[in-house]
Image (spheres, rainbow, N blue to C red):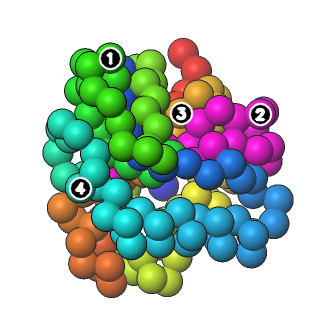
Amino acid sequence: MKVETLELEAFSIVGITVRTDNSDIQKLTHEMQSLWGKFIAENIAQQIPDKIDESIYCVYTDYAGDHTQPYTALLGCKVAATVLQSVSLPTGLVAQQFAGGKYNNYLVKGNLLEGAVFAKWQEIWALDIPRAYTADFEVYGANSQNLEAAEVEIFIAIRD
């Protein structure tokens, strides 16, 4: 599996959340589909003030331990850090700032409707890498618009 290690700056995300875990894949799938469904149906991206770009971020954070323990999924958009102090967010949206650090970057290429991203996560879970379990995330940019031939980036926080 091809991987690139990058040093990322701190970043801020505004969006909606769900608390979940990976113990029951059917339940996880339902919860994540519901989160994405709400994001799309309620046009959440358009409610987010001062977005840096149009990419959608799905951040996995607040881990209770490793990837087998509960965590929070935050689905939203990247915003300037100043937004967190200066803007009143619409009801139901949350803002969270994430420290920068060292990340492994994995590229997913494939059909999102057939589980390409989840398949890559299963590969990542099987790897022996020094994960930090601070904030791992997926970036759905311009190349993810064609769901049947998408490119999505996954960033995994690693310890120094």
Give the residue drawn at x 17%, y 45%: 53
Mark 4: secondary structure? helix
- Other residues around mark 2 within 10 Å, as few (<14) / some (14–19) / many (≥20): few
Using residue 7 as the reference point, say whether residue 30 is left or right of it. Answer: right
Give the residue drawn at x 24%, y 78%: 146
- The mark lying in front, picked from 4 and 3, is 4
Q: Work out whether residue 141 or residue 87 is closer to the camera in this orientation and state it.
A: 87
Name the residue carrying label 2: 64
Give the magenta part as a residue range: 56-73
- The mark lying in front, picked from 1 and 3, is 1
Q: Work out whether residue 108 or residue 73 is closer to the camera in this orientation and state it.
A: 73
Which of disc 4 and disc 1 is earlier in sequence?
4
Name the residue carrying label 4: 46
Is residue 23 inside the magenta stretch? no
Using residue 62 as the reference point, say whether residue 108 is left or right of it. Answer: left
Name the residue carrying label 1: 85
Which three-letter amino acid code belongs to the residue tagged 2?
A: Ala
- The mark lying in front, picked from 4 and 2, is 4
The answer to whether the residue labelled 1 contacts the one labelled 3, judged by CB atoms less than 8 Å apart, is no
